[in-house]
C-alpha cells in the first residue's frame, strides 16, 4: 500500500472488467471512490483480499489473492455497498473523467 499523510479508510467493493469480477477491499481517501478514480498520479488501484471470478461464471472462483492491482482504464463498473462510499456529493456529481 502507498503511504501518505492523507486519511484513508478501507471499504468493500466489486470491480467489473470485460472478463472478470473482482471482489475485495481497497483503501480510499476522504474523497471516496470517485476521488480515487480521478487521481491522475496512478493508473491502477490496489485491491486487498481479492477474489476473482469470470464474468460469465460468477460462482466459480478463478483465484484468491492477498493484493492485486486493477488498471483503472480497464474497469467497466465499481459496485459499492453504501452511497457514502462514492465520495462527497459535490465531487460525486461531477462523475468520473479522464483529466489530461
Image (cartoon, rainbow, N blue to C red):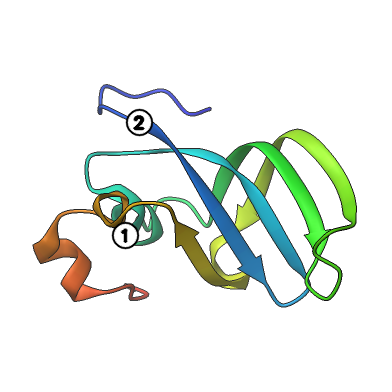
Q: CA distance from mark 1 to mark 2?
A: 14 Å
- The one nearer the camera, 71 or 26, is 26
Question: Is residue 17 shown above or below 64?
Answer: below
Q: Identify the residue shown where x is 51% and y is 50%.
A: 13
User: Hey, which quadrant is residue 48 in on the image?
Assistant: top right
The residue under label 1 is: 34
- The one nearer the camera, 45 or 89, is 89
Give percent across and percent down for residue 66: 73, 29
Question: Is residue 98 shown above or below 41?
Answer: below
- The one nearer the camera, 41 or 6, is 6
- The one nearer the camera, 77 or 1, is 77
Disc 1: CA contacts within 10 A as few (<14), some (14-19) or many (>=20): many
Residue 79 tag number: none
| Label 1: element kind | helix
- The quadrant in which the C terminus is found is bottom left
User: Hey, which quadrant is residue 37 in on the image?
Assistant: bottom left
Disc 2: CA contacts within 10 A as few (<14), some (14-19) or many (>=20): few
Mark 1 or mark 2: whose residue is earlier in sequence: 2
Q: Identify the residue shown where x is 33% and y is 61%.
A: 38
The residue under label 2 is: 9
Give percent across and percent down for residue 94: 19, 74
Question: Is residue 17 shown above or below 60?
Answer: below
Q: Identify the residue shown where x is 33% and y is 76%.
A: 97
Give percent across and percent down for residue 41: 40, 51
Amino acid at each position: 500500500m502507498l503511504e501518505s499523510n492523507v486519511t484513508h479508510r478501507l471499504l468493500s467493493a466489486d470491480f467489473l472488467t470485460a472478463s472478470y469480477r473482482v471482489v475485495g477491499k481497497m483503501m480510499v481517501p476522504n474523497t471516496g471512490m470517485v476521488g480515487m478514480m480521478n487521481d491522475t498520479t496512478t493508473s491502477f488501484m490496489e485491491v486487498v483480499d481479492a477474489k476473482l471470478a469470470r464474468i460469465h461464471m460468477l460462482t466459480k472462483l478463478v483465484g484468491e489473492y492477498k493484493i492485486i492491482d486493477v488498471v483503472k482504464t480497464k474497469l467497466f463498473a465499481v459496485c459499492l455497498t453504501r452511497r457514502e462510499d462514492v465520495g462527497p456529493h459535490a465531487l460525486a456529481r461531477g462523475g468520473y473523467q479522464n483529466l489530461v
